[in-house]
Image (spheres, rainbow, N blue to C red):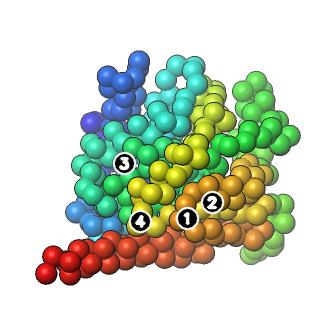
Amino acid sequence: TAEVPTLTTILDSVTCAQKGLCPVGGARARNSRQLYYEVHGDLAATQKMVLSVNGTCGVWSAEVHHFGTKPDHAVLVFDNRGVGNSDCGKYEPYKSSEMAMDTLDLLNFLKWDQDRSIHIFGVSLGGMISQELALLIPSRIKSLTLISTRCGNVWDLPSMKILNFIFRSGAIAMTREESLDMIMDILFPVSHLNKPTTKGKTEQDDLREYLSTLPFQVRPAGIFGQICAATGHYCSDPKLESIGRTVSPGKIAVVLGDRDELVYSLRSLQLHDRLPGSELVVFKDGGHALNCQFTEEVLNVMERIMMEGNRAFSSESSAKLIESL
């Protein structure tokens, strides 16, 4: 891999222990790509977290700040193919299963390959990729959390807000401000955006200021590829049953906002119903970007899920020790 100190993100350089461009694909892909990644915290940590989302890794700034400063924690964030500092490739559809193999290549490069060693958190398309990743490496997983996502059992026509954004981003030049306003309108309920904050501002004003700090590069080929991956994702009932069985006794959770307009909450509920042993966590009046809308609450949920995942295997180890005596 190539170290890339000149590539900047909004994430904390103090906690960043390693970053670079990792080649993925190799022999299995027609064209190999490079994924940009960062590891924050302690490279020798036993608490390893993998955070996956369809956008730039900068959206995980709160999680990186929270967990990257905790002892014995390592947080892996990365730009999936088509966004941020990662390669886009030619104009072609992506598949969630291929993107999961990209992630596996990155994990193998980092030597994050120990049994029951990682906590996976996937949001939106990142949650779909995480389902495919769990099928590939269930024995490495301590906990699996699928946020604002779906299994693909039903295809939904996107809302007019989303169709309008797709059309305008692909065919019409938009200013960054116009693009951010359209994105916020998709990701958050209007009631949340209109909430007053400080100095006469609203949540929408504060979010616009935050989102404007994220790396911004609209690449039509990347948008097209990721839309194809999300709309084409399908994790069948037998596959979900396999995830539930093979990740067990690890912790599995499905997290949703009941006012999500990007991935309808009904689809997240169906994912939970089809995923054996999963816990359901519902954020009332929550939109799609729960970690931005309910930052502290989501961090608390993540802490609890990791604790329960760790506890499952400490109990298992103790039981095996007793059996051997």
Instruction: Say which amino acid is labelled 4.
Output: Gly
Tell whether label 2 touches label 4 (CB within 8 Å).
Answer: no
- Of the two numbered discs 3 and 2 on the same chain, state the one appearing first in sequence: 3
Quadrant in the rendering for residue 102: top left
Position of 37 with respect to 10 (left or right) is: left
> Residue 149's x, y, as percent?
63, 52
Q: In front: 270, or 144?
A: 270
Contact? badges 1 and 3 (CB < 8 Å): no
In contact (CB < 8 Å): disc 2 and disc 1 = yes
Distance from Cα at disc 3 to Cα at disc 2: 20 Å
190 displayed left or right of 301: right
- Mark 3 belongs to which amino acid? Ile
Q: Residues within 10 Å of mark 2 (few under 14, many from 20)?
A: many
* Residue at the image position 78 percent from the left and 29 percent from the top: 167
Q: How many C-alpha atoms fall within 10 Å of the one at disc 3: few (<14), some, or many (≥20)?
A: some
At label 2, which amino acid type do we have? His
Q: Which residue is mark 1?
A: 278
Q: Which mark is residue 194?
A: none
Q: Is residue 303 above or below residue 248?
A: below
Report helix, strand or loop for mark 1: loop
What residue did someone put label 4 on? 250
Q: Residue furthest left?
A: 325
